[in-house]
Amino acid sequence: MSYIKRNLENVINQVTREYPVVLVTGPRQVGNTTMLQKLMEGTKRGYVTLDDLNERALAKSDPELFLQLHKPPVLIGEVQYALELFAYIKMSVDKNHEPGSFWLIGSQIFKLMRGVQESLAGRVAVLSMTSLSQAEIAGGEMERLRLTRRQHRALKEQLSV
């Protein structure tokens, strides 16, 4: 089966240039990981998933070492399994001020949002991914949203937790 381009890709590319952390949430099997791995092709971004029990154990027991081994730019999948990472991601972001340093994927939104709100407020764009739309399946794109400056500022505030 060939890859189906997602409408969220353009938004991710935009917020990656503005925010140090991008969190994509959504139910399992909607394509979060597939889409982000497609977007990182040809880049230096690394990938690690916390579905791997060894990686998860390291992230929980020694988040500082975990982030030394998986340096930005990095995509971390199933981040809800190690909320301990958030404080260390915050320290890295505050030290380096580099947009797009961390892409995070999480599927358990309520548990995840508690950690994000406590640790990454103002540093993260939170995006929600849903299942494929009819337009995506048909190979089309949604019409581009045109915003006034005021609407853009309001949307930016909503994306930033």
Image (cartoon, grey):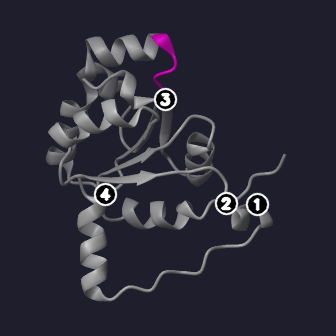
Residue 99, disc = 4
Q: Which residues are magenta?
A: 49-53
**Secondary structure found at label 3:** strand
Please tell me in which quadrant of the rendered image residue 135 appears. bottom right
Closer to the chain start, of discs 4 and 3, is 3
- Name the residue type under label 3: Val
> What is the C-alpha distance between the residues marked 1 and 4?
31 Å
Q: Choose mark 1 or mark 4, whichever is in front.
A: 1
Name the foreground residue: 38 vs 11.
11
- The residue located at (75%, 52%) in the rendering is 3
User: In the shown orientation, is residue 68 left or right of residue 28?
Assistant: left
Amino acid of disc 2: Ser
Q: Which residue is mark 2?
A: 133
Alpha carbon separation for disc pair 2 and 3: 28 Å
The residue carrying pointer 3 sits among few (fewer than 14), some (14 to 19) or many (20 or more) residues within 10 Å by Cα, namely: some
Which one is earlier in the sequence, the residue at label 2 or at label 3? 3
Determine crowd level at label 4: few under 14, some 14-19, many 20+ residues with C-alpha closer than 10 A: some
Residue 49 percent coordinates (x, y): 50, 27
* Disc number for residue 48: 3
Q: Which residue is mark 1?
A: 137
Question: Decide: marks 2, 4 in contact (CB < 8 A)?
Answer: no
